[in-house]
Amino acid sequence: FRDGRSWTDYRFDTTMRWGTGVSYALLVRVQSDAQYVSCSYALNGMGVQIYNVQNGKAELLSQTPELPYHTGDEVMKISVAVHGTMVECYFNGKNWYRRH
C-alpha cells in the first residue's frame, strides 16, 4: 500500500474462497523491508501458520489447532492486525494467533 512504511497500527480484512488454491497468506511489514510476518491459511482445516521472515529466511513461529472445515464454495474472511510489533491473525472474525 502506498505510504504503508509509516503505518504502525492497522488491520487488513479480505474475503476469499478456497477455489483451486490450497493456501492463502497475508503478509505484513513489521520493522523493515527485510522483516515481515505471514499469516498463512491452509485448506481443509489444516490451520493457521504464522511465519517470521527476515532477510529472506522463513521461521515457523506457531501453528494453530485445526480450523473448522470449509468447502471450496464458502466465502471466508481472513484478516491480519498490526499493533506496533504485535501481529494477530484472524479467520472468520476469530483471533487464531498473536505474535509479539
Image: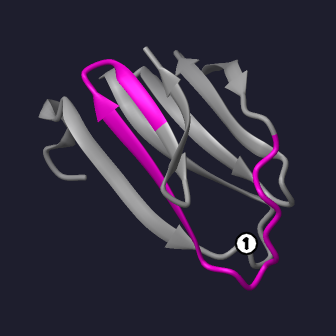
Front-lying residue, 15 or 35: 15
Residue 32 screen position, x and y as percent: 32, 20
Span colored in magenta:
66-88
- Location of residue 73 with respect to 100 vertically, above or below: below
Q: Residue furthest bottom?
A: 73
Left or right: residue 38 compared with residue 86:
right
Say whether residue 81 is magenta: yes
Quarter that holds the C terminus: top left
Quarter of the image where one finds residue 8: top left
Which residue is nearer to you in this view: 61 or 98?
98
Q: Nearer the viewer, residue 11 or 4?
A: 11
Residue at image position (25%, 52%) is 1
Q: Which colour scheme is used?
A: one colour
Q: In which quarter of the image is residue 5?
A: top left
Residue 91 vs 34, above or below: the answer is below
Q: Does the magenta stretch include residue 86?
A: yes
